[in-house]
Structure formats: C-alpha cells, structure tokens
Amino acid sequence: MAKKQKSQEVLPAEKPKAEKPKAEKPKAEKPKAEKAGEVQAEASILSEKKAKKARLECFENRELSWLRFNERVLEEAEDLENPLGERLSFLSIYQTNLDEFFMVRIGSLHDQKLLNNNLRENKTFMSPSEQIEAVCKRVKKLAQRHAAAYRVLLQGLREFGVRVTDFDSLEKNEAAYLETYFRNEVLPLLSPVIVSKDQPFPFLENRSLYAYCTLRRKGEKDRIGIVGCSVKSLNRLIQIPGHRREYLLLEDLVLHFLQLVFRRYEIQEASVIRLTRNADIDADSMYDEDLDYRELMEQMIKSRRRLSPVRLEYSRALQKRTIERLSEMLNLNTSQMFLCEAPSDLSFLSLIRSDLSGETDLFYEKRQPQRSTLIDHELPMMDQAEKHDILFYYPYERMNPVIRMLLEAGKDPSVTAIRMTLYRLAKNSQVVAALAAAAEAGKKVDVLVELKARFDEENNIHWSHTLEDAGCNVLYGLGKYKVHSKLLLITREKEGKKQYITQVGTGNYNESTARLYTDFCFITAREKIGEQAEKIFNALISQVIPEDITELMCAPHCLQNRVIEMIDREIACAKEGREAYIGLKLNSVTDRDILLKLVEASQAGVKIDMVVRGINCIRAGVPGLTENIRVISIVGRYLEHARIYIFGLGEREKIYISSADLMTRNTLKRVEVAAPIEDELLKKKIHHIFSLQLADNVKGRVQRPSGSYRKEDRSGEQAINSQEIFFREAYDGTLNEG
C-alpha cells in the first residue's frame, strides 16, 4: 500500500536556476507582400467568424422552423373564430403532420446520427443529435397545448350531444354492458404477448395502438404484457348503449379490462402506447439501372413498414424504470418518449365530423370552384390558348378545363403527341383516364410517372400499370433526381407547321387537392416555351438532365443560378440608388446559397416581401442583416401551395410561377420547372393575389426577428382574409380583374 501511495505522490517541480538572457538576433523583416498576405488571411478568418455569427442571428434551423409551422396549424384548432368541426380537422392535421415529420425528418436525422454525428447542417451548424434533442424538447411543450385543445374541443362537442368518455364516467348498467361486450366480442380477437426468455419483445407496427402493462406474479420477476388494440373487424368508437353520440375508445376498453386478458397476473401499471418508425428509406441509394424500377419501389414500400423506432407515445404516466426498460428494448432515447394526455391517434375525429355533417354551423360555408372568366367554356381549350395565355387559380377556379383540354387533344386529328409529368394523382384520376383514352385512340402519349413521390408510391404504381395497359409509353423518374415538375406538352401539326400548347403548374394534376390547395395553372401557345418544354421532355425520355433551358427555368441546372442572378441584379440596382424589389411566395425556403444572397440583398437595401407557408430558414427584421425582409405565413382553410417569384420593378420586372420551392432538394436535386408570365392581364392578376396575401390580417402571421410568428393587432382595421376574398371575387367574376 505504501508503495502505491508513493507512486501517486506529486512532487513540486524543481525551479531552474536563473540564467542570464542571451542577446536575441534581430529578426529579418518580412517582405511587404508576405505581410499583406498574412493580414488578408487573418481578415478572411475574422470575416468568416463574423459571417458564422451572423448566420446564427438571422437563420433558423429547418426542423425547428417546421415545428413553428405546425404550431400555426395547432393555433387554427385553438382559434374560437373557426367553426368547431373545422377545429377538429386542424387538430387531426396537426397530429398527422407530426407523425410524418417524425417518420421522415427525424428518421433522416437518426440515419445521419448513425453515419456521422459530427455532420452539421449548414445554416445553424447543429449536429443530428442536437437537432433531435431540440425538436423533442419543443414537441413536449406543444403536447401540452395539443392536449388542452383536445379537452376544449371535447367540451364543445358536448353541446351537440357528442361525448368521448372514459370508463370511470359510465353508469353501472353501461359499464356492465361494456364488460359483456368486451368478453364476447373483443377478448376472443386479441393476441396478448407476455415477454419472457422464451418470448421476445414483439414487433410493434408503425403507428398502431397497443395496451402495455407491467405484470407481477408472486415469486417471479415482473414481466411485460402487450396487446394489440387495432382490431380491423372492430369499430374504434364503441357506442354507449342508450346514447347515440356517446363513445368509448376501443383502446381504453382494452386497457380497462387488461386483468381479464392476463388473469394469472397482477397488473402493476398500464398505458396505451403507439410507436412511430423511420420511414425515410432513401430510394436513390436503392436505385440500380439493371433492375425493374417499379419492382424495386414495391420492395422499398414493404421495407418501410419495419424500420427503426423514432418516437414512442404513451397515454398514462409510467415508472422511470419502465421508461428505461422500453427505451432499451426499442433502442430509443428516453427523450423521444412522450406522455400524451390526448389520444395519440385522432383519426376517429373524422367519424365524429361525418356524424355532425348536418350541423352546418359547425363547418365552413360550402364553396365551389368557379368558371374562370379568362376562357369561353363552350370553345375548344387549345384554340383559346392559341389566342392568349391563360392562368387559373385553384381552388377558386375550376381544374375541369385542363381535363377537357386533354380529352380534346385525344380526339383532335392535328395532335401528334401528348407528353406529361405526373407526381401525385387522385384516387379516381380523370387525368389518367384522359391520357389512356388518347393512347387508345392512337395518339403518341409519353407519361413520366414519379414513383418516388413519398407515401404515394403505391398509388402511382397502380396508375403506371393502367397507363401501360392503355398503350402509353411510361417512364419512371430520372435516376437519383425526382421529377417534381408539373409539365404538359401537346404537339400539333397544322398546315405543315409544328405547334405547341404548353401547360406549367405549381400543383399536382389531382382533382381532389385542386379543391383544397391554392395553385396556379398556366397555359400558353408561345412557341419558345413549347420548344423548351419539348427539349425538357426529350432529355427526360433519354434519361439525361435537361440542359441549356433559357426561356423556362429548369432545375437542377437552370434554376438556382438564374434566381441568384436575378437577386444580384436587384442588389446592383439598390447599390446604384435605384428602387429594388423581390417578392416570393413559397411553401418553404431552405436553400443556403439563396438565403445568403437574400441577406446580402437586404443589406444592400433591396425591399423583399415573402409569403412562406411552412419551413422558413431566414429570420426577418434582424437589424443590420435582414431588416429589409418581411415574412408572412398564411395558414387557413386552404393549403397555400402556389409559388410565385417576382424580381424587379417596372420595365425590368420578371414574374414566374413554379413547381419549385427554394429548397436545396428542389433547386439542385429535382427536375422542376418555372414559367415566365408576360401577359399583362395575368401579371396584374398575380400582383393582386400577392399584394392581398401580404395584407392578410386574419390568417396571416408576421415573422419576428426571433423567428416566432404572431398575428398583427387589427383593432380598428378592416379584417382581410385573403382566401375568403379570392373566393368572393371568383363568385362575382372579378378575380381576373386584379
């Protein structure tokens, strides 16, 4: 022991004797050029540090910005000015949005974390772990508001005789009925599992409901019991006898009678649990040009169902050791486990909404898309497009003219070819039917069906079979580049001359979403645009990236650079003392190069207005950085989906509508198309739409320098709800007058 202690002793170092300092030789003077180089390098380092600090001040993390968007959806569920039935929808949308966010975005961060946790995103420099931690912390705070909103809505439903109750609130005769129902109808269909050495922890299906319990039997270690509550043959809403609109959730019934399931054990604690799994399979990494791509995508869909956990929700408080045990079994961090006081699956609210559909006061006033005043609905669409450009604005104006144009093209003897890109389609697609009819009539029909449209892969695979069976030439994407453009080209041969009708959209060719999403549909017979569209289709058919597209903008090679060039032009104008302007309407903006250029433009004095519905990684109004930028977000009855780019004022103004958000995935990793709007009437229409949205003080929220959003105080001001005004204008025929 003494020897060991001695080895641990730390002796003071002996001070060296003082020595007489030696005379230093004079250092050789560095050449001026070398000294200047060092100063420049040091300035560059300081400049980079300053730039990095500035980014942290005016940039927002993508995932946290998305949570701010979903918070705005939650606000619509909380807003007492919205009808009760619509608030139920917003609460469900909030939850399904969050489900997909965890499956895709958090799933992707999990993959990044496993590969390299030192990898940092390029705007706020957060690592995957830091982003997951920040997200989970924020989601737990929002969960409290979500539960409170649910309780308020339940209270509101009681006024209309609707109750979603718990077992303890039932009368004795009602409880007795439900016990009999459980024994006779439910119990025989359950498949309980007791985890042991011989029985491993079961596979939990993505987003399915399970009753979880801790089981105890004398002389034995505690065990885990699990019972699936998602029984397809049983209604999730169990009606209470004698009450037409009073219900108990099936999972709550199973949870209450767990003792009848595990008779030989004592139930120590119990909760309904729901696991969310990573669904972010990278289809690009699975791509192999020697394989059948459609078959590959079918395999990917099956794989998605068994991916690793990213979130666990539980309905009742569990002991700390239980949480740790679940964490270990699911290989899930405890920070990703959430206590949910509201049901973790709110899909049953749609059944309640349907039951209340007769109560018109509980829902928005019914609206129908109107006929556009830009066209004569009795004349052929292609003939009208040859005379003047056309711009429809969904859902205020109908999508029917586009389908009518496709049907006309299938029958028109002068039409030689129809080419179209399809990304998301309706369940009963009239667009597919029109294309199939054209092919069966002998037309050459090329259709590019994007099988990598997330969560719509199965639907697109189904429609690809239908199109092939009809005789269409069906293509599947462009390797690692998703084809997200909304592009239609009809080619005609008239009097020995080739003519084009081109349609460019901001939204999908989907009749269902055209009634719910705001989108633009642009139709033109301009020869230059038709030639460029043909060039894009020829490239896609040849499986190469479209290059040298000038009249249109086309990602991945001819969009981001063009946007930056137009921003640079406005910066130059501002530096010359001229008025400069940029207007952007987008779903999301995350492209770092474009964001940095917008900061530079703001600093140069360019006025920038942005209407961004969802993710927005730039903070407006930060002194010295983004004080010339104003950001509005509109979340309301219809999902804002249209994209507008406006650069410049007066004669140098350029306006585009586009399928592309200014996100890196859109600008550099997808095939996207933006079309210039040159017709003065259509430009006036777009200006009217954009200006009115900037003035929206009912559903519009203004971003603060902190990144948060809030509605403006409109006391004493006229209420401006842009979506309601657009529909009123569509009804009275003034939408196209600007």
Image: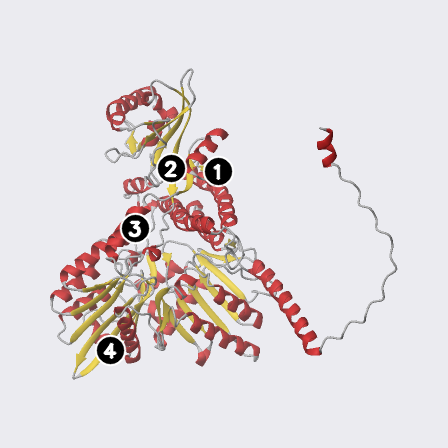
Pointers 2 and 3 in contact (C-beta within 8 Å)? no
Which amino acid, by three-letter code, is at mark 1? Answer: Thr
Closer to the camera: disc 2 or disc 3? Answer: 3
Q: CA distance from mark 2 to mark 4?
A: 56 Å
Closer to the camera: disc 1 or disc 2? Answer: 1
Image quadrant assignment for residue 626: bottom right
Depth check, front residue: 609 or 81: 609
Image quadrant assignment for residue 242: top left
Pointers 3 and 1 in contact (C-beta within 8 Å)? no
**Residue at mark 3:** 300
Q: CA distance from mark 3 to mark 1?
A: 29 Å
Q: CA distance from mark 1 to mark 2?
A: 14 Å
Q: CA distance from mark 4 to mark 3?
A: 44 Å
Residue 422 left/right relative to 667: left
> Split into 4 quadrants, where in the image is the C terminus?
bottom left
**Residue at mark 2:** 274
- The secondary element bearing badge 4 is classed as helix
**Residue 249 seen in the figure:** no
Q: Position of residue 700 (x, y in %)?
A: 46, 57
**Residue at mark 4:** 386
Mark 1 or mark 2: which comes first in sequence? 2
Depth check, front residue: 587 or 634: 587
For disc 3, the neighbor class at 10 Å (few under 14, some 14 to 19, many from 20) is some
Which amino acid, by three-letter code, is at mark 4? Answer: Glu
- The secondary element bearing badge 1 is classed as helix
Which amino acid, by three-letter code, is at mark 2? Answer: Arg
Q: What residue is shown at x 26% (from left), y 73% (from top)?
A: 538
Q: Position of residue 308 (x, y in %)?
A: 38, 43
**Residue at mark 1:** 334
